[in-house]
């Protein structure tokens, strides 16, 4: 049985990845994160793994070289797009990822890591995972900058893991994001608003878009997890790839899907927050040509089917 390191398991995508690995029969897993927050505990308890290792000591733990690791799937990150202290993102998203890359390079083992669609900024260079364009990208916030800096760094390394893949996740939503607060998906927030007072609040027009007509590529977390599994199991061509549906949906349509599922409620428009002007992606849409070109056949469900599945899974929860 392969020994896998999985980071970020106290968080959203990492916890879903751990659950799927368990369902596939993988239990030889070393999980890594900061495990202090009690509200995240349900994301890893009652799951199967060898050992839980605190993120702050993990690199030293690796350097002790007492365990045979066969692959690292690195999903841990500082994901707060409203945190504008770049030093925080640099430490957790750039330097920490470099340490893990270098370990995998020395050990000649696969390394799969989470990049982000935040690297594309306002999309002035498109949403093509064309590695020749990565130097041109201008992310809108420090989180996106840190992710792009690591992508750029990875591409110029002479020493690299046996196989590696950087996966640019678009707007992920689904179970286990309850702890993320303001950084939870808009689908989570809209559903909470619906449950609270029957009214979903959308942003008014911005960046040339009408009220609620901003568009994002929303991708269900189970599909993201399946994409990670595909890359780990198939190991075709190392590189950086988009992970999204390939079809943007308006916030209006997302709101209507949630209202339709509940069979009640309405939409209201609120002023676009001043603090987000200039740092907000009003449009994202993954180009999947490179992903499909290497044979990845993972199905990404559309927003309507994804919302239905999500709300069905969490319908027993009120928060």
Image (cartoon, grey):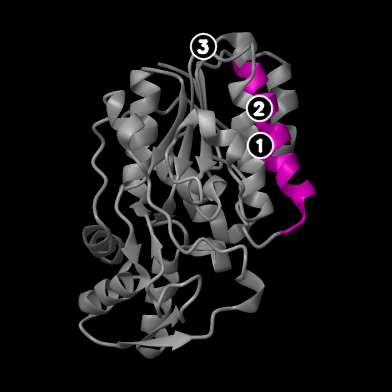
Separation (CA) of disc 2 from disc 3? 17 Å
- Pick whichever, 137 or 291, lies toward us: 137
Sequence-wise first label, 3 or 1: 1
Where does the image place residue 51, in percent across and percent down from the top left? Answer: 57, 31
Residue 153: assigned label: 2
Magenta stretch: helix, strand or loop mostly:
helix
Residue range (magenta): 84-104
Give the quarter of the figure containing the N terminus. top left
Provide the secondary structure element on which disc 1 rests. helix
Q: Is residue 177 above or below residue 193?
A: above
Instruction: Answer whether labels 2 and 1 touch (C-beta < 8 Å).
Output: yes
Separation (CA) of disc 3 from disc 1? 21 Å
Q: Quadrant of residue 309?
A: bottom left
Provide the secondary structure element on which disc 3 rests. loop
Q: Which residue is mark 1?
A: 149
Q: Is residue 6 visible?
A: no
Q: Is residue 160 visible?
A: yes
Where does the image place residue 173, in percent across and percent down from the top left? Answer: 40, 57
Let me know if residue 100 is in the magenta part: yes
* Residue drawn where x is 26% and y is 79% of the image: 259
Let me know if residue 23 is in the magenta part: no
- Pick whichever, 24 or 237, lies toward us: 237
Provide the secondary structure element on which disc 2 rests. helix
295 with respect to 190 (left or right) = left
Separation (CA) of disc 2 from disc 1? 6 Å
Residue 162: assigned label: 3
Where does the image place residue 12, in percent across and percent down from the top left? Answer: 48, 51
């Amino acid at each position: 049985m392969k020994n896998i390191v999985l980071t970020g398991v106290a968080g959203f995508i990492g916890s879903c990845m751990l659950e799927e690995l368990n369902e596939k029969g993988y239990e030889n897993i070393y999980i890594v994160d900061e495990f202090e927050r009690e509200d995240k505990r349900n994301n890893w308890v009652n799951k199967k793994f060898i050992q839980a290792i605190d993120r702050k000591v993990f690199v030293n733990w690796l350097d002790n070289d007492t365990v045979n690791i066969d692959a690292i799937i690195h999903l841990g990150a500082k994901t707060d797009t409203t945190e504008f202290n770049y030093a925080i993102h640099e430490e957790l998203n750039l330097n920490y990822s470099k340490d893990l890359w270098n370990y995998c390079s020395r050990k000649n083992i696969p390394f799969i890591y989470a990049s982000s669609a935040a690297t594309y900024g306002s999309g002035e260079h498109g949403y093509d995972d064309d590695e020749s364009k990565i130097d041109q990208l201008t992310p809108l916030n420090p989180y996106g900058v840190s992710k792009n800096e690591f992508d750029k760094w990875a591409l110029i390394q002479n020493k690299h893991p046996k196989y590696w893949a950087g996966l640019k996740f678009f707007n992920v939503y689904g179970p286990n994001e309850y702890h993320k607060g303001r950084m939870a998906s808009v689908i989570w927030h809209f559903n909470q608003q619906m449950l609270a007072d029957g009214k979903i609040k959308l942003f008014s027009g911005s960046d040339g878009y009408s009220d609620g007509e901003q568009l994002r590529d929303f991708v269900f977390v189970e599909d993201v997890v399946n994409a990670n599994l595909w890359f780990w199991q198939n190991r075709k061509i190392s590189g950086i790839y988009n992970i999204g549906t390939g079809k943007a949906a308006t916030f209006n349509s997302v709101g209507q899907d949630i209202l339709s599922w509940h069979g009640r409620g309405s939409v209201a428009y609120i002023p676009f927050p001043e603090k987000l002007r200039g740092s907000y992606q009003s449009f994202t849409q993954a180009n999947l040509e490179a992903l499909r070109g290497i044979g990845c056949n993972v199905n990404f469900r559309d927003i309507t089917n994804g919302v239905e599945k999500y709300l069905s899974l969490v319908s027993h929860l009120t928060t």
